[in-house]
Image (cartoon, coloured by chain):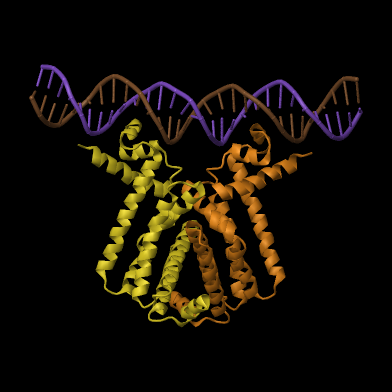
Chain colours: A yellow, B orange, C brown, D purple
DNA sequence: AACCGGATAGGACGCTTGTCCTAACGACAG
DNA sequence: CTGTCGTTAGGACAAGCGTCCTATCCGGTT
């Protein structure tokens, strides 16, 4: 009954390879080589390459949910939880410099391919979005929680993309510092964002 | 002597297709169909697909240089020039929502492919970087001009990537508004950034 | 009218891809 | 030992790819 463990190995290796090489660029031969199984054996576990992608995305969704739940459990203050999010840029700095953000690069690639799994990939990003939104709301930013969540999401993606292009370690540190400063200015009620919000509604 | 115009048509169509579909996903057949020439005729103008990519990047470099020069010539104030840069997010909003930023998505794709033309693609981004750096320096931010340029670059890339994922028009408008606000706070000397800068040097 | 050389069309080539088939392996029940 | 069934290996298959060759076209020169 090695089927489940083999299947899991395939998804795990595919996850890694899709991240490092991209989905389109990764072949069955690549995955087979990484797992150490025969190329023809795939068909028993997955009918198509898209099914592997689907499984990889589901795996990422589960892993992300676990990570977010841990961040939530590890600190009671929403500010500190958001800092956990910001700090993944430091924790994964090496990988991000080499291959970009796994979430953003997959969304970007599947968008260009107009792939059926595009929405599923976006769902990983939405996981972060709604989680961040909750934390900002808990900070007292009920009305502009989503604006702040999207802002932080975009800042992180931009940092990852530029860091990947230039392979610049120091840049990540500087930007993360600015991000943490920005978060401090969000503590309590932000008059500027309140003004923008009421302007949009009015 | 139609050679030059055919060559230009190939590069132009390839430029557009590489943007919309990505480099790897775009085939010779795609380009041939768009230009309206035979597939076999490519070899006369370009030996390899990589040569086409090289020509496309050179074209983008030239176009970018022209655009930056125009922005420079159209306004004497560096703040206003930087606003021109920020406003491309509005001007190209539709395309960006559909296909992302042409600069960022190509850099990201070539990074994953570990392509030889990767540095050439990054050069397009560097064109913006150095131009923005000059403008920030002209605003009195000599010491942190590059930090500010990189910051604005990353913010723009993040906005484009997230807007592409979610196809959200309003998000672009909100973020551009925040970007313009941020630029206003950069006018004159920024105490916060000055403090960070001296901290790094010390 | 004959010629020449730049430009083009069409297709051959070798290779890789995702997909799919089939024979064989190996643990386990009878 | 024998049969069964989940699992695996190896390779066949058509399609599409980038690359490359060659016959043909066509405008300009003599």
Residue B122 in percent (x, y) is at 55, 55
Report the number of discs. 0
Between residue A94 and residue A32, name the one nearer to us: A32
**Residue B72 occupies quadrant:** bottom right
Q: Residue at x 25, y 67 (%)?
A: A73
Residue at 63% x, 68% y: name it. B84
- Percent across and percent down for residue B178 are 52, 73
In the depicted view, which residue is nearer to us: A139 or B49?
Answer: A139
- Which x, y percent locates residue D4? 18, 24
Dividing the picture into quadrants, the one containing residue A47 is top left
Can residue B161 be spotted in the picture? yes
Q: Is residue A163 above or below residue D26?
A: below
Q: Residue furthest front?
A: A202
Could you tell whether B76 is left or right of A25 in the image?
Answer: right
Q: Identify the image quadrant of the C terminus of chain B.
A: bottom left
Foreground residue among B29 and B106: B29
Q: Quadrant of the N terminus of chain B?
A: top right
Does D4 sit left or right of A103 as displayed?
left
Percent position of residue A127, x then y: 36, 60
> Which residue does the image show at 36% across and 39% down from the upper left?
A31
- Asked if residue B146 can be seen in this view, the reply is no
């Amino acid at each position: 009954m090695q089927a489940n463990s083999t299947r899991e190995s395939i998804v795990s290796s595919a996850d890694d390879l899709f991240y490092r090489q991209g989905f389109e660029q990764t072949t069955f031969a690549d995955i087979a080589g990484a797992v150490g199984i025969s190329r023809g054996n795939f068909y028993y576990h997955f009918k198509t390459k898209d099914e592997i992608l689907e499984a990889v995305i589901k795996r990422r969704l589960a892993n992300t949910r676990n990570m977010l739940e841990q961040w939530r459990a590890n600190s009671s203050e929403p500010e500190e939880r958001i800092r956990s999010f910001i700090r993944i840029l430091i924790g994964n700095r090496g990988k991000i410099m080499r291959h970009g953000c796994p979430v953003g690069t997959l969304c970007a690639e599947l968008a260009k391919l107009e792939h059926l799994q595009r929405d599923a990939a976006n769902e990983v990003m939405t996981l972060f979005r709604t989680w961040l939104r909750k934390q900002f709301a808990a900070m007292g930013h009920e009305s502009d929680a989503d604006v702040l969540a999207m802002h932080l999401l975009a800042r992180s993606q931009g940092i990852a993309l530029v860091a990947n292009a230039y392979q610049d370690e120091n840049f990540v540190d500087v930007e993360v510092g600015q991000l943490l400063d920005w978060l401090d200015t969000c503590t309590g009620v932000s008059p500027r964002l309140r003004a923008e919000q009421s302007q949009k509604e009015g």
